[in-house]
Image: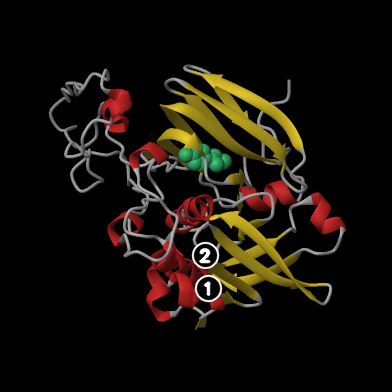
Amino acid sequence: MAMTAEKTMASFAANDVITSPAHGRTGYKTFTLGSFQFSRDEYFAWIQWPAKGETRTHAMSIDAFLRALMRDVAWGFFYGWVNFDHVLGTRNHYGTVDLYAGTFNGTLRDAGVNYTENFETPLIMATFKAILHDWTNQAFDPFAAPEETGSAFGCKNGDNVEAIERTRISTIRMPGIPGDSPLRDDLPINRAFADVVQDEPRVVPEPGFENELHAFNLFKYLSRSDVTWNPSVTSVCKQSLFCPTTEEYILPIFHGNDRVEWFLQISDEIAWDIADKDSGEPRARVIMKAGDIAAMPADIRHQGYSTKRSMLLVWENGNGDLVRMHESGEIPPWPVVF
Ligand code: PHB
Ligand code: FE
């Protein structure tokens, strides 16, 4: 899932690190990436860019900013658009990445105060990782549910390298097959999933098919997930990628997909805000309860809310040619015509 750029990252250094007036007081570094500048203080991330001859400034609550940044880094910029909020975001061109402010916000774009700059993936990745490392304090885990982590706020206070070095698990075929990703039995069962049965299925292959037939308990696997809003690629069959995940609180990004994806609500409930992909104008609110299935079209952005930790299966199509097929209008943005 567009993770290959990370492998060459070592050859790129993060862009210039400069210090701002807040640095002396709060201890955080300020970063530049092209014409963008990122700084933080006790409560906010400040993002600046040039437009119409002036410096424009946008603020995000630092906890929301770090949660979004964590996903963008761990997912290698994901499919299509990762909107940190209604202003800031990235668009993946699989090799290069656009960083934008206001470009996918109808009001800011119409006012001409938006800005987009394109970067080689390893450079923006190295810069984003450097920001994440410097701005994440020892108590804060940007992957954790708010009830399961300490505070993101305040002056610089240590770091949390272990938490932010997690990347999504990427399976070759299925967890538990020898040589493939592990079943994570070592992790504790999450407090929200104490009732999830922990049996594994009994697999009895015919002689000679021992390496062909495999099964595992997906509910058990998910009940032990220590992160939220982080789909792992858990079964791979040609271009069909099953990416289950556990969800609590708010999906930290508004994702604009460059292809259709399917959601299968495995347990509990998620509310989705759906908006136009280009302008951000609200389009729908979808409540998904256990057993519900929905297709998310390729022309929207979406953000989910889950009070009780829930299990969601995100079903992705790994075919890279879909981007071109959607952009040229060769295929419609929805999967079924009724
Ligand atoms: C999505 O954008 O489709 C998405 C991302 C992360 C999740 C769930 C869904 O945990
Ligand atoms: Fe999505």
Q: Quadrant of the C terminus?
A: top right
Residue 212 relative to residue 279: left or right: left
Residue 109 relative to residue 18: left or right: right
Residue 166 relative to residue 76: left or right: left
| Badge 2 density bin: few <14, some 14–19, many ≥20, Cα 10 Å | many
Q: Amino acid at mark 2?
A: Asp
Q: Which residue is mark 2?
A: 41
Q: Which residue is mark 1?
A: 22
> Residue at image x 64%, y 51%?
323
> Residue at image x 48%, y 16%?
291
The image shows residue 198 at horizontal and vertical percentages of 20, 22
State the image quarter where residue 54 is shown: bottom right
Q: Residue 159: in sight, yes or no?
A: yes
State the image quarter where residue 197 is shown: top left
- Compared with 247, 39 (above or below) is below
Q: CA distance from mark 2 to mark 1?
A: 6 Å
| Label 1 element class | helix
The image shows residue 9 at horizontal and vertical percentages of 41, 73
Q: Amino acid at mark 1?
A: Ala
State the image quarter where residue 173 is shown: top left
Q: How many marks?
A: 2
> Residue at image x 12%, y 28%?
207
| Contact flag, marks 2 and 1 (Cβ < 8 Å) | yes
Q: Residue furthest left?
A: 207
Mark 2 or mark 1, which has the lower sequence index? 1
> 215 or 277: which is nearer to us?
277
The image shows residue 169 at horizontal and vertical percentages of 34, 48
Q: Residue 29: in sight, yes or no?
A: no
Question: Within 8 Å: ligand 1 and the Cβ of disc 1?
Answer: no
> 50 or 210: which is nearer to us?
50
